Image: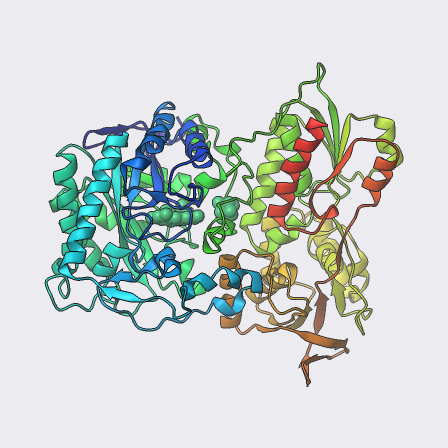
Amino acid sequence: MAHPALSSPLTLGSLTLKNRFVMAAMGSNFAESDGRCGEQLKAYYEARAAGGCGLIILETTSIAYPAACSMPNMVGLSSDDFLPDLTDLVNRVHAHGGKIAAQVNHSGKVSQEDVAAGRPLLVPSTPGKKSSDMLPLLTREELGNFIKMAGPDGRGPQYQEMTQADIDTVIEQFANAAERCQRAGFDAIELHAGHGYILSSFLSPAVNKRSDRYGGSVANRARFMVEVITAIRAAVGEQFPIIVRLDAYEYRIAGGISVDDFIAAGKLAAAAGACAIDVSAYSNTGSGQGFTEAPIAHIEGSYRQFAARAKREIKLPIIAVGRIEIDTAERDIAAGRYDLLGLGRKIIADEQLPNKIVEGRHSELRPCIYCYICVSQIFVNAPLCCAVNTAVGREREPVIASTASHAPSMVVVGGGPGGMESARLLAEAGCQVTLYEKEPQLGGTARIAALAYEPNGRLIDYLAAELKRLNVVVHTNSAVTSEQLAALQPDGVVVACGADRSAPAISGKDQHHVFDGEEMRGLLLGGDDRGLKKLSPLYRLMVRSAQALGLLRPIGLVRLFSKLWMPLGHRVVIVGGGLVGVELAEFLVERGRKVTVLNLDATLSPELSIVRRAKVILDLREHGCELHNLCENIEIGRHQVHYQIGEASHSVAVDNVIVALGANPNTGLADTLAASGTRVVTVGDCGGIGYIDGAMLTARQQVQALLAS
Ligand SMILES: Cc1cc2nc3c(=O)[nH]c(=O)nc-3n(C[C@H](O)[C@H](O)[C@H](O)COP(=O)(O)O)c2cc1C
Ligand code: SF4
């Protein structure tokens, strides 16, 4: 067995888990608008139980529904009316041998639905005014979703410092909700005492300024949580497991929760009756970069050391989370550093993760590419979705299997993510699939995206491995014409040959120090050699030598060597502040270039998810990259680029210019095939410009359409 520690059972109080995989609580916005668990939510969790997860922790819920909600479609626990659907959810998880805990919560100062409804937010102490560095980075449409935070009268959130009576009411609500979960058949509850919600706002010295018995010392700040645990214990009896989720540390919050505070609170929780501690962290949510420090860790294994300290000092079973790789967790659990692996994004990306690990099929894991689309959906009150796993939220709509008596023969043109995903889905549906790619490698434009952002490369590797496993016939270095395709007489064709990416008319763009997107891709990854022709003889020789040695094939090698040398000078101007321009800036800044981005529009990289966009842009600014919006009249000179913003004229010194503009859907091949009567669909950028998530989603939709036609 490849991962014996992760595959081994564990007992938590009265509960025995079949393995160490725990699905961390993740808000989905899948609940019905009246707080019930509906079919979409049940199917989503059932799929993860079928995927072999030992313990599922249901997303954040409200003990005071419809009050105390942080999302519009949140699960309610405040009345027996919710019981039938909660019970059905539990039964469907149990049917697959999984266990399920409910995360019982009161959103406190994060209860945006209370603000929208004009109800005051319950807080330990009235907070000061908060600012956010993310708001200026949002599109007008995204900003619209934040408007309800102004409340019905436009005055913003109103706060209510909790009286003893308020505290007693909330304690009773927690106890009632926990007892209701027990009656619904849940195997445990997780008490949410982290992430800025009501219990953690008491725990945090930065928020809790009280001078009564709930403020001051850590024991006083933890008193509310302890009283809640005690009341729950009284309501559910001695055996029912209570897990407590705590923040081990508050990042970017002056005077916030320290690791010592966390350990002390954990010990108090244990003494009050908790049976396990789930170790998370929190950050200043007004900071775009903070959110990717905690609770959604960007750095691998960010909170592992907190979990290990908790294990040593709190002496309870410990759940660790925060972008922990499977092999790392295996080693940590075997070494006794913690007991259970909490999975957030990885189990959104692949619901079969536990089964694949337990069965030794690690190589089949569909990787998370850390694009933050899932959590950005929640920011704008939209239902959860996943860039790489288009089945999320669509668990009830499987891709249709072919019903033909013979395996239909399907051809896919283009080996980018959209083409590869189409080929994978068609092969899974029982078709014989052949894929043609004109470049020497699979990956398409995602290869350049993988250069800029390493996790994107994992998706290319996964899809390429899946095509092999599913016996898809792959021809690289093979551009096909409509005549060749017609001669093959396939039952259907998926055209996923991307976009035409040549720079639009910009004054000065034809000079030798100016490259468009395709030329840049050719320089860094081989293929298109128009950029090569613009280089000096010495640089041309160096790039050709790298190509001849095969150094431009593996993306990892290109990432490494490009840190040592690239055929670009120190000062680079990127014209175009869309996704491609911004990710390119990230890549170049990491390689020591002084980069200026001239964006023609009002918002930078609107195609990136809010959270990733905020992180990239704020990181770029921190590293001295200049990003300008609404640039007009751009003129590229040999040593300077001139541009205008409003009435003001500017210029910037430059060694090289990259024009990251001008992608047009490439529909020619599909149109010709359709005209000749071939069953054809377009996927990815050749049907309309999208990103990896757009390519993956159109692959699913178009393969479904092709199989149904
Ligand atoms: C889409 C999304 C929603 C989340 N919602 C919750 C939640 O409802 N309750 C909670 O305690 N944590 C929530 N989290 C945090 C996760 O439980 C987890 O701690 C975090 O994602 C780090 O784990 P990971 O690196 O494996 O994703 C959410 C995370 C994501 C990605
Ligand atoms: S949306 Fe992106 S970050 Fe979220 S789980 Fe999917 S791949 Fe990972």
Q: Quadrant of the N terminus?
A: top left
For the residue pair 529 and 291, the one nearer the viewer reads as 291
Q: Residue furthest top?
A: 405
Q: Residue at x 73, y 46 (%)?
A: 687
Q: Residue at x 15, y 57 (%)?
A: 165
- 79 lies above or below 548: above
For the residue pair 316 and 62, the one nearer the viewer reads as 62
Q: Is residue 429 visible to the viewer in this orientation of the structure?
A: yes
Q: Quadrant of the C terminus?
A: top right
In the rendered structure, the answer to whether residue 121 lies left or right of residue 265 reads right
- 241 lies above or below 452: above
> Based on the displayed image, in which of its 4 quarters is residue 600 positioned?
bottom right
In the rendered structure, the answer to whether residue 147 lies left or right of residue 546 reads left
Residue 266: percent from left, percent from top: 19, 50
Q: Residue furthest bottom?
A: 648
Q: Is residue 569 visible to the viewer in this orientation of the structure?
A: no
In the rendered structure, the answer to whether residue 703 lies left or right of residue 41 reads right
Residue 590: percent from left, percent from top: 55, 64
Residue 406: percent from left, percent from top: 72, 15
